[in-house]
């Protein structure tokens, strides 16, 4: 660590033992993204978390800047948190704009390398050094630290005499702890030098020094006015606002603030001085509230909503609506809109709105991470009910179409809807779609017209997925055969079967039974054609058994294998048994006795016989006759269905122990003896048989292929996924495509008087003035939760829906222009929300909590786009 010059006798210089280690002060999100994404790197020790708060004077009053004629210092306290929020698994802890990290020089270089590699597509090199422009973004800052005896805290003082004037001004901006919550996560280990584990005393060379101050030099990175770190990636040089003057400089050159090629830090002075800056006001992050800020900024720039809430909206407040919130949500939202659009406004802390939200929607209480679209849906519905002009909702009963013209039925449904729902939200944001249900049995057609507030569009993937499966014949003719096929990444099991059937040249009289293998037994069968392929993980191992269609009515026998230890006591094998290999499967034809079951098993093993000379010369009549005698025990394509089975010699196969078992091959319910056939009740449709082998018997077979199944997909260590791209129109087409209802969403057919899995078709009928489109990036399944990073190519200036609207008569313009985007960066468990907003002329701005930056048009489209806001373009 660099040693600052300081002649004060009462100050002690703090340094690492090596005397050279630097400590870097960086945005926490910048460090976390790099650390979490560096594959193969061991986890660093958990950071010590400190919460910053204004310092207290000796009289107990708040004190943030100590001013007198001799000095001008910034002071605050750092209190160690015993239960770090980092341990929580629910939310976006530590990624707001007010969370920072202390890291060592080595950590900083590693993170800088990762961000550099993420930004530019360069070939990886063995060595790395910080680039010159990265170093120029680092500047030193001197801090004086001391330990507070009465609390597990540090007192921090930044003195103007220790730092240059410009650096001291920057420090005042960074450490403005009275504005909003700030946390510092120490990963460098420096603060551990300040405390003993038991009594929180500061030690240096074994002596107590709590009355002294220690000088610490921090290397500040990523926090100057000229740089902005987004989702952990250092953006290009931004325009810098200097000393309150209405000019901006970049690399020493003066330019105006209209440049869309650079990011600008919008300080309150700049906002108030720039013409047309109304509405360019940030929202403070109260603690994982970026999801709320993102949605609020999009609504705060929705044209007619802004005009409405800046006007006399209170006159339409509905205090009688039992579905509303007594107007409190509308009042809180309206007050927030007025603050955001006030002249010269500074970043607003939406605490009142947050408290109202938590009161009426407890799911949003606390400070956990939430979904911006879920908040948007609740807020729009809440505003509608609070502002509903209908005081007493009449009862209306919607009628089925019954062959009437769609136009008449749609108008009737819309009238019924407006009779109960009439608000500014309905006027601006609600449309109508046609829903057609067809019963698969009686072909009854039901047509309804339902309102919508937004469209939730699926993301059809254009990327294919490579999968490797192992095909096993059930006729004892060939060994295992692995096949690598390509299927749609988000396809169905029927797509997998179709591709695999073509790859293995499956006959017309054959079918495939798909199963997942784990620890030598089948853990599940993939029998439903509509099951999603996302249920199959890359590390799974799948087997496809080739079966004859003609034998589907015969019981299925699943053979599992165990090896008995080669220990003999008085001629009897004893000791533990160990499972090996994968299950073999076949249909059983004929009587279910030991002879038939054993012959069937030996036939399946025939391809694995070890034909070496020493084994071939052995006299084993059981194995030589087994495959021939089992010809009628299993049915394959082109094989005879003769039930006359030759019996296998009981003395030659008596070494094999056959047991009825469970699906996992753990229990041995009953041994299958020669004289006791398996009764029908024990067989049902599937018979699980555990075969126990003596060691000398196993040596006659090559069982290695049975013990090495390939994974579905072996991921390379340095492999990178290709960027998926899909058009917004393709998403809309997928939304409007006819599809069957799910088993949990059955439709009650009025003609059949039963619930049916009907087919459903949606059509756009009436489009709203403001069209909100939700891209369904988050997918949930039985086993997985995933975020789709698909890049959606959405129109900005001309979204034309004329080809997708079902009602052509009397429809207003079908063309839309984008004016706001809610973005989500990062993974499903965390991440960060921002908003892109079109504001004033042809300019776009990035609203990142309390910070607002101009952004160029070409940066609007990203794979982080989550909710799109369009306004109708009136055609002249």
Image: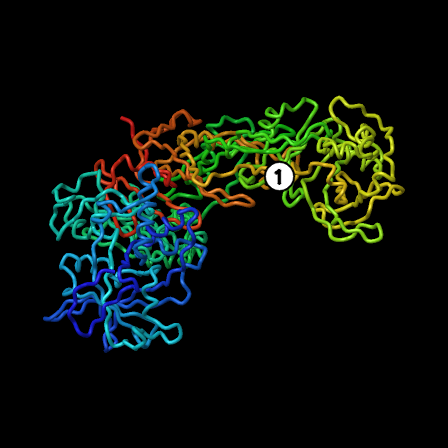
At x 62%, y 28%, the residue is 443
Quadrant in which the N terminus appears: bottom left
Residue 744 at x, y = what percent?
59, 42
Query: With respect to residue 814, does 250 lie above or below?
Result: below
Name the residue nearer the viewer: 862 or 729.
Answer: 862
Residue 463 at x, y = what percent?
46, 31
Query: With respect to residue 802, does 779 lie above or below?
Result: below
At x 60%, y 31%, the residue is 482
Q: Seen in the image, is 521 located left or right of residue 838? A: right
> Is residue 328 in view from this perspective?
no
Judged from this view, the residue extending furthest toward the right is 675
* Numbered disc total: 1
Indicate the colouring scheme.
rainbow
Please tell me whether mark 1 sits on a helix, a strand or a loop: loop
> Is residue 855 in view from this perspective?
yes
Residue 236 at x, y = what percent?
24, 42
At x 30%, y 77%, the residue is 207
Q: Seen in the image, is 49 located left or right of residue 66? A: right
Residue 10 at x, y = what percent?
19, 74
Name the residue nearer the viewer: 681 or 34.
Answer: 34
Name the residue nearer the viewer: 170 or 46.
Answer: 46
Q: Look at mark 1 in the image and give the residue it sits on.
A: 708
Quadrant in which the C terminus appears: top left
Query: With respect to residue 425, does 169 lie above or below?
Result: below
Q: Residues within 10 Å of mark 1 (few under 14, many from 20)?
A: few
């Amino acid at each position: 660590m660099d040693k600052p010059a300081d002649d004060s006798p009462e100050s002690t210089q703090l340094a690492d033992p090596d005397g050279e280690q630097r400590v870097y002060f960086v945005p926490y999100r910048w460090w976390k993204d790099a650390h979490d994404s560096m594959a193969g790197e061991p986890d660093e020790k958990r950071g010590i978390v400190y919460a910053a708060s204004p310092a207290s004077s000796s009289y107990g009053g708040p004190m943030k800047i100590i001013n007198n004629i001799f000095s001008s210092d910034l002071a605050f306290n750092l209190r160690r948190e015993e239960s770090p929020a980092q341990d929580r698994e629910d939310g976006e802890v530590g990624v707001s704009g007010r969370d920072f990290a202390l890291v060592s020089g080595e950590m900083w270089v590693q993170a800088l390398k990762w961000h550099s590699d993420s930004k530019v597509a360069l070939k990886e090199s063995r060595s790395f050094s910080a680039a010159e422009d990265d170093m120029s973004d680092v500047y030193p800052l001197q801090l004086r630290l001391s330990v507070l005896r009465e609390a597990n805290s540090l007192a921090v003082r930044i003195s103007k005499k220790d730092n240059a004037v410009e650096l001291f001004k920057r420090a005042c901006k960074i450490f403005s702890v009275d504005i909003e919550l700030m946390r510092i996560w120490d990963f460098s280990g420096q603060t551990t030098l300040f405390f003993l584990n038991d009594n929180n005393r500061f030690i240096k060379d074994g002596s107590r020094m709590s009355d002294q101050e220690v000088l610490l030099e921090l290397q500040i990175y990523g926090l100057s006015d000229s740089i902005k770190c987004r989702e952990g990636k250092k953006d290009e040089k931004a325009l810098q606002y200097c000393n309150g003057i209405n000019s901006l400089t970049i690399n020493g050159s003066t330019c105006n603030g209209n440049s869309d090629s650079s990011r600008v830090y919008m300080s309150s002075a700049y906002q108030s001085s720039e013409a047309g800056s109304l509405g360019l006001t940030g929202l403070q992050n109260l603690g994982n509230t970026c999801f709320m800020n993102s949605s609020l900024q999009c609504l705060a720039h929705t044209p007619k909503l802004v005009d409405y809430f800046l006007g006399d909206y209170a006159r339409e407040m509905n205090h009688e609506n039992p579905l509303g919130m007594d107007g409190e949500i509308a009042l809180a939202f309206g007050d927030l809109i007025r603050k955001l659009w006030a002249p010269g406004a500074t970043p607003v802390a939406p605490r009142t709105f947050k408290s109202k939200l938590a009161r009426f929607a407890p799911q949003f209480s606390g400070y956990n991470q939430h979904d911006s679209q879920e908040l948007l849906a609740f807020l729009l519905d809440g505003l509608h009910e609070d502002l509903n002009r209908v005081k007493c909702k009449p009862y209306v009963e919607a009628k089925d179409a019954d062959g009437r013209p769609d136009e008449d039925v749609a108008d009737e449904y819309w009238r019924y809807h407006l009779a109960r729902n009439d608000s500014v939200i309905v006027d601006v944001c609600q449309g109508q779609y046609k829903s057609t249900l067809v019963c698969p049995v009686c072909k009854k057609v039901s047509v309804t017209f339902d309102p919508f507030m937004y469209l939730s569009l699926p993301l059809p993937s254009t990327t294919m997925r490579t999968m490797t499966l192992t095909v096993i014949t059930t006729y004892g003719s060939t060994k295992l055969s692995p096949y690598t096929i390509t299927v749609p990444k988000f396809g169905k099991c029927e797509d997998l079967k179709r591709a695999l059937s073509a790859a293995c040249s499956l006959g017309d009289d054959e079918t495939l039974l798909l199963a997942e293998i784990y620890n030598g037994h089948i853990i599940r069968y993939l029998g439903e054609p509509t099951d999603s392929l996302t249920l199959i993980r890359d590390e799974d191992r799948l087997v496809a058994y080739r079966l004859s269609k003609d034998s589907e009515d015969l019981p299925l026998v699943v053979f599992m294998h165990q090896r008995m230890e080669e220990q003999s006591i008085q001629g009897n094998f004893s000791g533990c048994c160990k499972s090996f290999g994968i299950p073999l499967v076949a249909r059983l034809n004929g009587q279910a006795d030991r002879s038939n079951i054993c012959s069937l098993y030996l036939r399946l093993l025939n391809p694995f016989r070890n034909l070496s000379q020493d084994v071939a010369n052995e006299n084993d009549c059981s194995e030589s006759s087994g495959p021939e005698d089992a010809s009628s025990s299993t049915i394959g394509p082109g094989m005879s269905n003769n039930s006359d089975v030759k019996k296998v010699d009981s003395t030659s196969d008596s070494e094999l122990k056959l047991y009825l078992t469970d699906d996992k091959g753990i229990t041995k319910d009953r041994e299958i003896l020669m004289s006791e056939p398996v009764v029908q009740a024990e067989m049902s449709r599937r018979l699980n048989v555990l075969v126990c082998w003596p060691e000398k018997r196993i040596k006659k077979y090559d069982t290695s292929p049975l013990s090495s199944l390939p994974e579905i997909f072996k991921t390379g260590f340095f492999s990178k996924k290709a960027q998926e791209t899909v058009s917004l129109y393709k998403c809309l087409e997928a939304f409007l495509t006819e599809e069957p209802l799910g088993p949990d969403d059955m439709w009650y057919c009025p003609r059949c008087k039963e619930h049916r899995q009907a087919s459903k078709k949606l059509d756009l009928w009436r489009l709203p003035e403001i069209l909100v489109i939700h891209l369904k990036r988050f997918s949930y399944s039985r086993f997985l939760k995933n975020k789709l990073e698909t890049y959606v190519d959405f129109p900005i200036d001309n979204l034309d829906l004329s080809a997708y609207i079902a009602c052509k008569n009397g429809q207003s313009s079908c063309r839309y222009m984008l004016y706001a985007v809610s973005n989500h960066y990062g993974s499903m468990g965390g991440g960060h929300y921002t908003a892109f907003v079109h504001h004033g002329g042809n300019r776009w701005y990035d609203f990142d909590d309390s910070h607002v930056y101009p952004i160029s048009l070409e940066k609007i489209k990203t794979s982080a786009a989550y909710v799109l806001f369009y306004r109708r373009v009136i055609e002249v």
